[in-house]
Image (cartoon, rainbow, N blue to C red):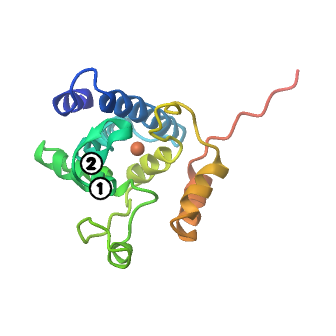
Amino acid sequence: MDPYDIINKYYPEDSLAKEILIKHSEAVANKAVRIAEHLGLSDDQIRFIFEAAMLHDIGIFLTKAPEIGCKGSYPYICHGYLGHDLLVREGYPKHAKVCERHTGTGIRKIEIKERNLPIPYRSMKPKTLEQKIITYADKFFSKDPAKLETEKSIRRIREKLSKHGENKVEKFDKWHKLFRISEKPSGRS
Ligand SMILES: [Fe+2]
């Protein structure tokens, strides 16, 4: 499948939402693929990670987020499950799971209930390695039009996640240990 075909179907040419979606998704896909290669994942897994990372935010156009060109009516937090439903209709149920499981470090059923979130009552935590890698890579990039390609620092990511609970920071730290690509030590000649 070509993820750009699906993006082109739902996002008008030359729209702000499309420009932001593509730049953000390419940044996330690029980082997620580098991690997958570093971990030695198979070609099939890497291809899936690229496609699903390109589509993880496909649901944003249905939400109300005018600062990023999204003129829908749903609250922004709904973009995950809306993207999920869209990709299921398109025939991609496996990619769809990434859409609804990538928000923050994932959303637990109990949080949906306790915080009265306007999303379906089901576990939206990433479960597979591929889902976890994409969710982790996504935390490094915002959709702020001025900062689309700039990686956030670990300190900034942790700060943002801590607003939603310390357990989110712990989950991120756990993934960071598994997925970080350490810089090669500089050789001495
Ligand atoms: Fe994202």
Residue 62 percent across, percent down from the top left: 22, 46
Give the amino acid at mark 1.
Pro
Give the amino acid at mark 2.
Thr
Q: Label 1 crowding class (10 Å Cα cut-off): few <14, some 14-19, many 20+?
A: some
| Residue 180 drawn above or below residue 54 | below
Left/right placement of residue 48 relative to residue 134 reads left
Label 1–label 2 contact, CB within 8 A = yes
Q: Nearer the viewer, residue 2 or 147?
A: 147
Label 1 to label 2: alpha-carbon separation: 6 Å
Q: Nearer the viewer, residue 70 or 171?
A: 70
Residue 180 percent across, percent down from the top left: 61, 46
- Image quadrant in which the N terminus is located: top left
- Image quadrant in which the C terminus is located: top right
Badge number at residue 63 = 2
Residue plotted at (35% across, 27% down): 19
Residue plotted at (33% across, 52% down): 76
**Residue 49 in view:** no
Residue 169 percent across, percent down from the top left: 58, 63
Left/right placement of residue 64 relative to residue 35 reads left
Badge number at residue 75 = 1
Residue plotted at (24% across, 48% down): 83
Q: Mark 2: which secondary structure?
A: loop
